[in-house]
Image (spheres, rainbow, N blue to C red):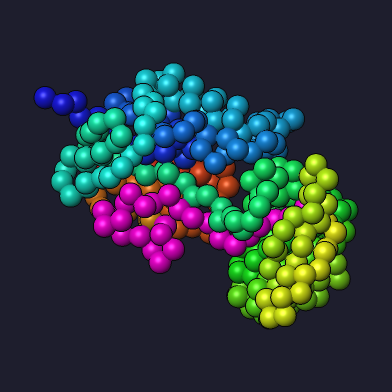
Amino acid sequence: MQHIYDVAIIGGGPAGYTAALYASRAGLNTILMEKNFAGGQMALTGDIDNYPGFEKGIDGLTLGMKMQQGAERFGAKTKNTEVIAVDFSKAVKQIETASGTILSKAAILSTGASPRELGIEKERELIGKGVHYCAHCDGRFYKDKTVLVVGGGNSAASDALYLSQLAKKVYVVHRRDTLRATRVYHEPLIKAENVEFLWNSTVNGFLTDGRVVGAAIQNVHTGTVSEVACDGIFVSIGRKPATGFLQGALPLDAYGYIAADESTRTAIVGVFAAGDVRAKALRQIVTAVSDGAVAAYYAEEYLA
């Protein structure tokens, strides 16, 4: 008869490994599945200085490995494999992976979300060299410098406001002639003396000298291209949750995020969602860690 775990966790980012730590420490037979490496998106971050306990900061890969080691210390098992499909229709949850089937009594989904990219040449090779996707993570590197924010929604407006308190100059590039962000952001941005809007425009190229030194800006109506000098570019055009394999298995919101409240409970009993994959206001390492602990707590309560 195939082994049935108490808790199966899908995704090895900070939420997943915190859930694994709390679940295994509570004596639950726990397995975590991660297709890449410990830390998830966090592992791609070079310098993390807003996670408590590291006075000199820490890189994401090292922090991810430490989280994995902490969970495995209490018996959590890591399986490096990709999850292809799930069946949560029965009391025993069935998880199909590239290397076989995993069965569990409870499941915690912590697959995260990745930033939507501009999709233009050199973008990926310039990540950390002037191209960023998290102003609250990397904005401090641009104190008294010039930055460019791409996007017009709430996240872009929030990033621009935050950066306006650090940077000397903030350009906001948006393909329309007004922000899509809620009205609460409009007046503070318009009043900020160091914020300039580049309306009806898109970024269609990077100016580089080993790192970003500017951007090529194209007017969407006339097609004319101009160059804007800047030290950094913050892309804020949304995020893409890793929930493709969950289609039809449980409710997702209009953007593909898992619908779950602050208890991390989903619409399916015994299934929990933690971290960036859950519909929520703030997506940071500390909030993911919090979600992981909460999910494990309620999973333990469910199994009692």
Determine the image quadrant of residue 205.
Answer: bottom right
Give the left or right position of residue 49, taking residue 269 as reference: right
Viewer-proximal residue, 191 or 121? 121
Position of residue 210 relative to residue 146, above or below, is: above
In this rendering, the answer to whether 228 lies above or below 60 is below
Q: Magenta residues, as a range?
A: 232-257
The residue at the point 18 percent across, 39 percent down is 92
Q: Residue at x 67, y 76 (%)?
A: 220
- Residue that appears at 88% across and 53% down: 144
Is residue 217 among what the camera can see?
yes
- Percent across and percent down for residue 169 are 85, 62
Residue 162 image-quadrant placement: bottom right
**Residue 3, position as x, y percentages in the image:** 19, 25
Q: From what the image shows, is residue 17 above or below residue 192?
A: above
Residue 282 seen: no
Main SS of residues in magenta: loop
Q: Please state which of residues 47 and 229 is positioned toward the viewer in this rendering.
A: 229
Left or right? Give the position of 53 relative to 71: right
**How many numbered circles does the render carry?**
0
Considering only vertical position in the picture, is 270 above or below 39?
below
Magenta highlight on residue 236:
yes
Residue 15 position in % (x across, y down): 47, 40
> Which residue occupies the extreme left position in the image?
1
Q: Quadrant of the C terminus?
A: top left
Q: Quadrant of residue 204?
A: bottom right
The answer to whether residue 66 is left or right of residue 233 is left
Is 255 colored magenta in this rendering? yes
x and y percentages locating residue 198 in the rendered image: 76, 73
* Residue at 51% in and 38% down: 40
Horizontally, residue 296 falls left or right of residue 106, namely: right
- Front residue of 207 and 68: 207
